[in-house]
Image (cartoon, rainbow, N blue to C red):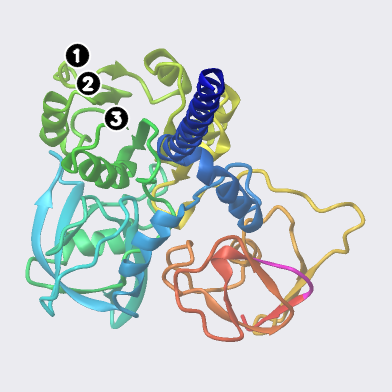
Amino acid sequence: MTMTTGILALIILTVILLQVAVGALLLYFHSKGHYKKLDNPVDEAEPAQNTSTKATSTTAVSTITRSTTDEESYHPAEAAWKGFREFIVQRRVPEDSQHSVCSFYLAPTDGQPLPPFIPGQFLTFKLAISDTDQTKSVVRCYSLSDAPRSDYYRISVKRAQAPVGLPEIPAGLASSFLHDQVREGDTLQVRAPGGHFHLMEAEPLPIVLIGGGIGITPMLSMLNTLLENGTDREIWLYYGVCNGADQIMKEHLQTFADNHHNFHLYICYSAPLESDIEGIDYQHKGRVTLHLLRDTLKLMRYQFYVCGPKPMMESLVPGLQEWGVDSGDIYYESFGPASLIKHEQTQPSASAEPITVTFSESGKSIVWDVGAASLLEFAETNNIDVMSGCHAGSCGTCQTKVKSGEVEYTQQPDADVEPGHCLLCISTPRCDLTLEA
């Protein structure tokens, strides 16, 4: 009987231990799966992100992709107001010694709190510019250059000069108007923030911000937001200008570098003045190049955000890919939304039928150029007069009636599109197309 009782107790103990072990294993694997999701949100989001990129863009580099979190934070600003809203210029602040860059602090005249935006986005302006005896409406977009605030937005605008050696080409119409005629107390018509070039705050990767010239403005918005919110992500900023006379926000950037151990600042002067001191005023003599990035960055995965003049973009963006950076980790814009650079596009098969685009108002029927980035670029190349503004699907200026045929968007439009119309700047033809242009 004693033997039987001992065996029974041993069996019961074994069963209890097995139950405890199974429970512990289940708890372990559940926790492991949970922490994997927390530690690697990028890996979880990548498949959907890549699918979206392939479906909406034919570029070799995904110009912009959004995560679900970004979409949620994006829509409040987009839906905050329709059309244009009146803002008053509270302050004007020259940002460089030559006064070629001026910041404008804008507050809504209705006094209502401003919606947040995603750092990197831009504002669209409708400017009433007097030209001799008439006033014309000009639409322009300018990147927001500060973190989101509830009481004001800030843009920093560089005066566009006439090209060197081409005096017959006038200086920038809109930037000259803002610099020369818009004063504190004046009002401007402004659309809600928009644009697909913006910070991916939901992803925990270290960040490399690269700004050339006035391309620094969206980087300032990203940088201010990250550091003011106390991020622990490592941030590198490469800011390229000609010399100290062209640099903006110098003290602001240096204060950030002195006070944040996770922020690494590289100011690059391509032609420093005698008064510019290397190691104090700037860290690198020369332009921002792939060679500089390889020499100063650790070998690890980063998110790259790039904005600057077209030559810099056409060198750096393909160079990053050749270095082995995944295209999904490269986000870029060339001097604002009006001039996104074009990369090699997927060519149709040899058996594909050529597409004819007819511009009914202009009386032209032209075979579609598969190398064109958009219908707007195609129209401009063929001397079709089309109104345009942001070139990014946000301002709605290039909205055109489709009389027959279908178009395909390279990205989701931000502007409201009327039924039977399309935005030429972000669309391509799917078949023979007739446009009222």
Q: Is residue 224 above or below residue 319?
A: below
Residue at 37 percent across and 36 percent down: it is 204
Q: Give residue 73's quadrant in the image.
A: bottom left
Residues drawn in magenta: 428-432
Visible residue check, residue 342: no
Residue where numbered disc 2 is placed: 282
> Left or right of 18: which side holds 360?
right
Distance from disc 1 to disc 3, alpha carbons, whole Å, reads: 16 Å
Visible residue check, residue 67: yes
Considering every residue shown, the one lying at the far front of the view is 1
Residue where numbered disc 3 is placed: 242
Give the mark nearer the N terminus: 3 vs 2: 3
> Left or right of 376: which side holds 179?
left
Q: Is residue 176 above or below residue 114?
A: above
The one of 58 and 437 positioned closer to us in this rendering:
58
Q: Secondary structure at mark 2?
A: loop
Residue where numbered disc 1 is placed: 279
Distance from disc 2 to disc 1, alpha carbons, whole Å, reads: 6 Å
Question: In the rendered view of the protein, which quadrant contains the C terminus?
Answer: bottom right
Place of residue 264 in the rendered image (x, y in percent of width and height, measured from the top left): 26, 24
Q: Label 1 neighbourhood size at 10 Å, few (<14), some (14-19), many (20+)? A: few
| Kind of residue sitting beneath label 2 | Tyr
